[in-house]
Image (cartoon, helix red, strand yellow):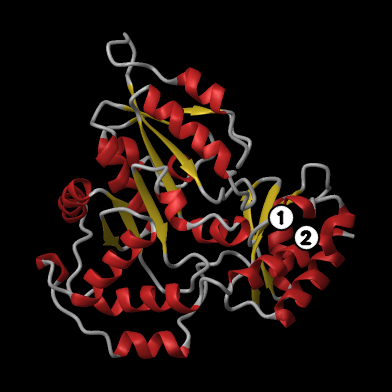
Amino acid sequence: MADLRSDTVTRPTKGMRAAMARAAVGDDVFGDDPTVNALEAHVAELFGHEAALFAPSGTMANQIALQLVVPPGGELLAGADAHVVTYELGAAAVLGGISTRTWPSDGAVLNVERITDMIRPAGFPSVPTAAIAVEQTHNLGGGGVVPLGTLQDLRVAADKHNVALHCDGARIWHAHIADGVTLAEYGALFDTLSVCLSKGLGAPVGSLIVGSRERIAKARVIRKRMGGGMRQAGILAAAGRYALDHHLQRLTEDHERARQIAEALAPYGVVDPEKVRTNLVPLDLSKHDVSAPALASAAAERGVLIAAMLPRVARLVTHLDLDEAGVDQAIDVLSDLLA
């Protein structure tokens, strides 16, 4: 099978497994797992922040971060198809008591003026805005990269209106490689970030919340409350550190393979290769006679797995475990089904 459903389907490499096997461990709930502590310090340094906290999943990392910057009853602004809105099962409301209001989403294209106009100040009869969340790269936006200048303008607006800025940076590594913007440059723009080690980098599990020392101390309490306190988590942290040390620069290969797929499928009118900048290839089937679920089902029967994200939007994702043979197989099968 050529599995292009997600970059979360990867399996640990031999080198990663070896690093996990030899990891020094302790009890992370007590704060004495040396491998976890080292990973947290390393990631915090990469983004130019004071501290970071290892969490089991990207959703938990996002939800902890949102609770750090939005009090119960406060308002979060986000895009209508943001992961924190569409794919986290209402966790912001259920777990954090957070009210969410959205702007019409155009993927990684942000209208800073429109977002700024949505901010409601404290004292307003409606719920005051406490934070803005953006996604880098943008999942339903086809892996699009929000330009650095746009984020800088949004930071200025957030400061002017005294609201926090959170980055769902599940695939911020891909933005870093695609645009050459340093992780520290991104880190300087956000009050909190969540960054994922199992999307693209190939670790089996794990994300981190990044922020100030004070916020991360609070995050540790929230993580425990949410059931995310882990014990000998150094085995998992070792995989994450190995991924950062060995799999970050190779993301270029995934980007190139995604572009290769996009160029091959472009003649069928389902994708614009110029918009495929990272490892996600969205297929727009709105003008095609096949639905996304039907395409996914037919492709699976021929050994190619893809994700049906919406009724008329399918997604292909390149990753560490997808080689050239898998790319060729995907192109052959999908070209035949779309022809």
Q: Residues within 10 Å of mark 2 (few under 14, many from 20)?
A: many
Give the quadrant of residue 122.
top left
Q: Which mark is first along the chain, 1 or 2?
A: 2
Q: Is residue 78 visible?
A: no
Give the quadrant of residue 328.
bottom right
Q: CA distance from mark 2 to mark 1?
A: 7 Å
The quarter of the image holding the N terminus is bottom right
Q: What residue type is disc 2 on?
A: Ala
Residue 338: horizontal and vertical position, in percent?
A: 85, 59
Q: Residues within 10 Å of mark 1 (few under 14, many from 20)?
A: many
Q: Dot 2 lies on which element?
A: helix
Q: What residue appears at the point 58 percent right and 62 percent down from the top-left corner?
A: 177
Q: Which residue is mark 2?
A: 262
Residue 201: horizontal and vertical position, in percent?
A: 49, 70
Q: Which residue is mark 1?
A: 276
Residue 81: horizontal and vertical position, in percent?
A: 54, 39
Residue 319 placement, left or right of 74: right
Q: What residue appears at the point 23 percent right and 30 percent down from the top-left corner?
A: 72
Q: Is residue 257 visible?
A: yes
For this orientation, the residue located farthest to the top is 125
Q: Nearer the viewer, residue 229 or 90?
A: 229
Note whether 166 is above or below 97 in the view shown.
Answer: below
The quarter of the image holding the C terminus is bottom right
Note whether 255 is above or below 83 in the view shown.
Answer: below
Check contact, mark 2 vs mark 1: CB within 8 A. Answer: yes
Q: What residue appears at the point 18 percent right and 54 percent down from the top-left corner?
A: 220
Q: What residue type is disc 1 on?
A: Val
Note whether 289 is above or below 256 in the view shown.
Answer: above
Q: Dot 1 lies on which element?
A: loop
Q: What residue appears at the point 60 percent right and 42 percent down from the top-left corner?
A: 108
